[in-house]
Amino acid sequence: MKLTRIIERLNLRVCTAEHRLDREVQNGYVSDLLSDVLANCQENDVWITLQVHPNIVAVAAIKGVAAVILVNDRQPQEETLAKARQENLPILVSSLSAFDLAGKLYAILNEPSGAQ
Amino acid sequence: MLDEIVRLLDARLIGRTTRLEKRVRMACGSDLMSDVLAFIKADALLLTGLTHVQVVRTAEMADVAVICFVRGKQPAADVVELADSALIPLLVTDLTMYEACGRLYSQGLPGCHEKR
Amino acid sequence: MKKDDSISRLDAVAHTDKCALGKPDSPRFTKSQELVYELTVADAMRRKVITTTPRTLMSELREILRANRISGTPVIDNGRLAGVISIEDFIMWLAAGEPDCPIGDKMTTRIDTLFAHEPLIHAVGKLEETGYGRIPVVDKASGDLVGIITKGDIIERLLRKLEIDFHTEEIHRYRASHIFEDIMGDKVALTFQSAVKGQDFSLAGSASSRLKKTLERLGIDPQIVRRAAIASYEAEMNLVIYTDGGTVTASVQPDRIRIDVNDAGPGIPDIEQAMQPGFSTASEWVREMGFGAGMGLVNIRKCSDRMELVSTVGKGTHLRIHIDIHADKSKG
């Protein structure tokens, strides 16, 4: 599913890289541990996390994720936003909890293709 | 309810507590203990990739009903021991956090919402 | 055990004038001193004794002591006097945060006893020398428990015999049950303190865990216990993460819990900044442990009714957490 569609269906707020939202997303990855994301996250995943500090940008860039979604309405730090703009990394925000967001994302990504 | 969760997540029970008296009312997926403490309500299922002792301490403080470790992470013996003495059941699933949340959510288990 | 004046006079007689036993008519004796030789243990003891069994649980002891307004009980096993359990034993078990267990595990088994027919002066001496709050009285022949005697009982009996008008308060001062009431009442706070080792993640949380268990055993409302436990835990984690260690001191009164957290650590340069959600000075390894997301102080504030945070860079930090307990919410 295209990232733009996901943003629409999940009511996400876009903070950075508004021009880079046309990627195709297959899967989500939920983790707050950088070491774990570095080890296991796949390219083009959307990374769902609570972490708001600048290191998430570096990790996201290295792994080539499609976007980072912050949950519980977390505000990314200024430095994080600045770095994200530099890297052209979309940072999105949801007011849902990680569990709920992952749940919804899982449901829509696993819908039979007609319903997208 | 514990058996349902075990079945749904293809999980295995480790540790000595194999029964759950209370109903699990909601789930929370996080690796950040402070955030767990901020948002989790009592009688929740905590999904996490973090396997050290503080996870059990956090669960104890917040009256978490059951802990499930994702990504096949096995906690060390001291963690299991602490959970046993706190009478908290421990599960391990090979699913990713994303997949686990997805499955539980699709079965109607709600997430923990922060009161606004 | 605190000595009180009338008992001091009596035991001055008991200890220094042992040779005066049986010679109460010497001019040095006061009326009350005479009486103490004249009366027997049986005259002053209580015959209706509240007892427990070795199988009664420590958690049940609290209610037994409270409901009967006593400070301890003899422990009876199959009709035989097996030991004595006191409120001091209860408090030590509480403060150590040990799991619930039968009284049999905690009771004193080397029991001092008195015989009913003994002169009351013996009871005075025995209470002073052992420091116990109560002594079981047994029948000499059968060894059966026939009564129990405390300092308060002795004084009450003497005063009644002397027909002195007394203030209820005077008597009540020496009733051992008042000690329990003082603790659960509004005069004295139950205080316990734990040291927290800095940088030791395996131990971190143990102080808060003990606090939580103690609060649960005191029958405090579970929601309040939860808030206190979470606030304490977050504070404890801050000590472990950012300092070389400190102390967590909890002070419990019936209407409020106060938790003081102190360290001699680096101090917080900008407290307002530190209180913002998400602000953190934690290093990466701390984040990998699941902490350092900048929610600790925020959580503490959320859990508390009032919070004071004072810090000096280079000297240390003092955090004080207040949680109000609403009247009569404690479980029986």
Image (tube, coloured by chain):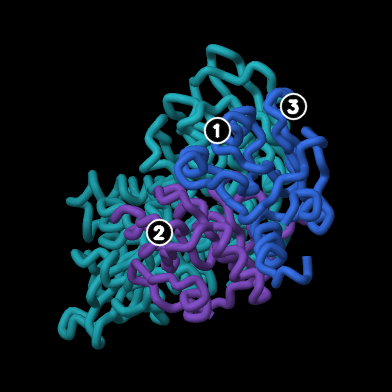
Q: Amino acid at mark 1?
A: Ile
Chain of the residue displaying label 1: A
The quadrant of the rendering that contains the C terminus of chain A is bottom right
Q: CA distance from mark 2 to mark 3?
A: 35 Å
The quadrant of the rendering that contains the N terminus of chain A is bottom right
Q: Which mark is residue A85?
A: 3
From the image, tell me which residue sits under label 1: A62
Which chain corresponds to the colour blue? A
Q: Is C323 left, or right, of C49 in this rendering?
A: right
Q: Amino acid at mark 2?
A: Gly
Image position, residue B7 (x, y; %): 48, 78
Q: Are marks 3 and 1 on the same chain?
A: yes
Q: Are marks 1 and 2 on the same chain?
A: no
From the image, tell me which residue sits under label 2: B72
Residue occupying image coordinates x 68% and y 63%: A109
Residue occupying image coordinates x 31% and y 45%: C12
Q: CA distance from mark 3 to mark 1?
A: 15 Å
